[in-house]
Image (spheres, helix red, strand yellow):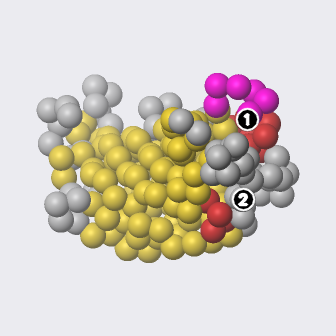
Amino acid sequence: MSTTEIRQALPTGIWYLDSVHSSIGFEIAYMAGAFRGQFREVDATLEDTRLTGSAQVASVEVKDENLAAHLQSPEFFDVERYPELRFASTDVEGGDELTIGGEITIKGVTQPVELTGRANEPLTDAYGRERFGLTLETKLDRTAFGLNWNLPLSSGEPALSNEVTLAAELFFVKEA
């Protein structure tokens, strides 16, 4: 953890995502380990305590381009029909851990979700702009969004877990 002070509430005002320093990724148990990926093209805005964001499905990044194509196919995200994932918050609670309730839309299906994490205290960068970081995580059942593809192993167990962890490391810059 950095020396930056951690806060448990979101700052007020209008904040825009610094996409160069931000990331939204996923992790899912796959056979004997974990499979990870991320979305390169993401956007988010924080207006007072309302957080909204999106990720472009076509920007999914994994270590194999054939696998990226499979993730974009109708068996997974179906990028042609559903080009983006979306999130909109409905409430924010502070405390020992920041909790953001909201709705996430994946493959045209919207479900309630609760994100947990922390927000860093805003600071002024070397160029005089206010910035802050927000780290969030949640777990989802991918089948609730129609992401049902799987491959049975010789044991009869599925190769791919239904539980997916989404993790976001977001950096925001305050509107000038």
Q: Residue at x 77, y 57 (%)?
A: 82
Q: Nearer the viewer, residue 89 or 104?
A: 104
Mark 2 or mark 1, which is nearer the start of the sequence? 1
Residue 33 position (above or below residue 157): above
Res 62 quadrant in image: top right
Q: Residue at x 33, y 69 (%)?
A: 92
Magenta residue check for 81: no
Q: Nearer the viewer, mark 1 or mark 2?
A: 2
Left/right placement of residue 113 relative to residue 155 reads left
In the image, the segment drawn in magenta is: 62-67
Mark carried by residue 165: none
Q: Could you tell me the amino acid type at mark 1?
A: Ala
Q: Residue at x 72, y 64 (%)?
A: 146
Magenta residue check for 66: yes
Could you tell me if residue 9 is visible in this image? no
Q: Nearer the viewer, residue 31 or 26?
A: 31
Which residue corresponds to mark 2? Answer: 148
Query: Are the residues at dot 1 and dot 2 in contact (C-beta closer than 8 Å)?
Result: no
Quarter containing the N terminus: top left
Residue 176: image location, x then y, percent? 39, 45
Crowdedness near tag 2: few (<14), some (14–19) or many (≥20) residues, C-alpha within 10 Å: few
Crowdedness near tag 1: few (<14), some (14–19) or many (≥20) residues, C-alpha within 10 Å: some
Residue 27 position (above or below residue 115): above
Residue 54 position (above or below residue 65): below
